[in-house]
Amino acid sequence: MQLKRHQTMKRASEFAMVRAQGSSAAGRFLVLSTLPYSGEGAGAKESRFGIITTKRLGHAVVRNLLRRRIREILRAHGEPLRQGHYVVLIPRHT
């Protein structure tokens, strides 16, 4: 099972808005940015997730593996996360 289409962020403008206006918390392995969702409609109650992987993490195979693992964690355990937020996750190079 995958994240639903309305649960993912695809537009660069959404990512930029969350990074500029939202709040961030950095950990050893991950940077998390959030912004309350102000839109209305069917998906307004569910959080929207976006993942940014940079070339610093490794080649394409490594970046895609990280994205798949993060999406699986969100799919399995993302329900208790706050509803109605944009969430951007950025894995860090260790």
Image: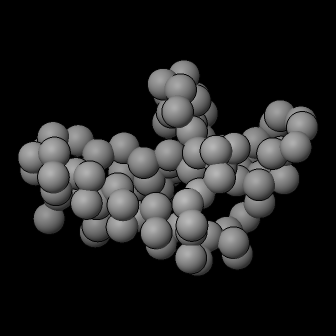
Give the residue drawn at x 57%, y 67%.
Answer: 1
Relative to 59, 32 lies left or right:
right
Relative to 85, 17 lies left or right:
left
- State the image coordinates of residue 30 (x, y, percent, origin top left): 35, 62
Q: Nearer the viewer, residue 89 or 23?
A: 89
Q: Residue furthest front?
A: 1
- State the image coordinates of residue 8 (x, y, percent, origin top left): 58, 45
Give the residue drawn at x 52%, y 33%.
Answer: 10
Give the residue drawn at x 46%, y 61%.
Answer: 71
- State the image coordinates of residue 2 (x, y, percent, origin top left): 55, 60
Q: Nearer the viewer, residue 35 or 7?
A: 7
Quadrant of the drawing holding the C terminus = bottom left
Above or below: residue 74 compared with residue 36: below
Q: Is residue 20 visible?
A: no
Q: Nearer the viewer, residue 3 or 13?
A: 3
Relative to 68, 79 lies left or right:
right
Q: Nearer the viewer, residue 19 or 67?
A: 67
Give the residue drawn at x 77%, y 54%.
Answer: 46
